[in-house]
Image (cartoon, grey):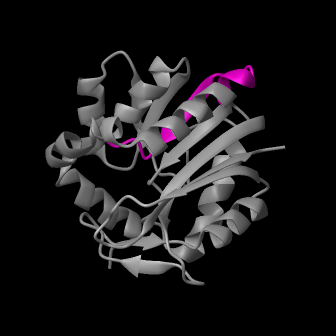
Amino acid sequence: MMEHQDETRTAYDGVVELYASMFANRLETQPFSRNMIGTFAELVRGTGNPRAADVGCGPGHLTAMLHDLGLDAFGLDLSPGMVDHARRAHPALRFDEARMEALPVEDCALGGVLAHYSMIHTPPGELPALLAEQVRVLAPGGLLLVSFFATDGPEPVRFDHKVTPAYSWPVDRFAELLAGAGLVTFARLLHDPASERGFLDAHLLARLP
């Protein structure tokens, strides 16, 4: 059986153009997500270290948004097909293939990490190690903005995502994982996206002391 990363890579490689056509301009109709990313960018600029990674960048649209907001942003994604699309769509920006649990970034290098629905496919037992890797690359005072599907129940819920299986999380449980990784969550936003799945959209903004 393939590791979940291999399954995820294969699944996203198979939907590159469709995914890009559906999501490249989607934030134009998602003011909550758009404004959380804007707040993240403003706070990262305020650290004095504008270097930021968009992990799980997909077709690169949010990497470009971070760049437009004044960050020295680059994108990383598990899917070579997504990386190739991002490079073609945004040739002035840097995109590389990488796994989120093994980022090609030096220690304490970044002012910010954006993880926009890119941790949702990670099995719950593997998420602490993945978060530890994001913390490794953040400089002191650096910020992580993580977005995910939220559930009201006490435990993560596995569901059939349209691309590959994913998990929704109780917000407090996810915040506890961030704390366990050494991050301090100082802002959270929950909103109803009118999803047919019934999940809320959740955004947690955390800082490395």
Magenta range: 44-58
Q: Is 112 on the left-hand or right-hand side of 32?
A: right
Which of the image's four quarters has the N terminus? bottom left
Residue 12: quarter of image? bottom left
Magenta stretch contains residue 166: no
Q: Is 127 on the left-hand or right-hand side of 135?
A: left
Q: Is 55 on the left-hand or right-hand side of 112?
A: left
For the residue pair 202 and 4, the one nearer the viewer reads as 202
For the residue pair 59 and 69, the one nearer the viewer reads as 69
- Image location (x, y in percent) of residue 161: 30, 69
Task: Tell me what residue is drawn at x 53 percent, y 72 percent.
Answer: 169
- Image location (x, y in percent) of residue 48: 74, 19
Magenta stretch contains residue 54: yes
Task: Tell me what residue is drawn at x 46 percent, y 44 percent.
Answer: 33
Task: Tell me what residue is drawn at x 55 percent, y 40 percent.
Answer: 36
Task: Tell me what residue is drawn at x 29 percent, y 41 percent.
Answer: 26
Which residue of the protein is positioned furthest toward the bottom in this rendering? 154
Which of the image's four quarters has the C terminus? top right
- Image location (x, y in percent) of residue 4: 39, 70
- Does the image show residue 60? no
- Image location (x, y in percent) of residue 142: 73, 36
Report the label total. Answer: 0
Image position of 192 with respect to 41: above or below: below
- Does the image show residue 84? yes
Image position of 83 with respect to 168: above or below: above
For the residue pair 1 and 83, the one nearer the viewer reads as 83
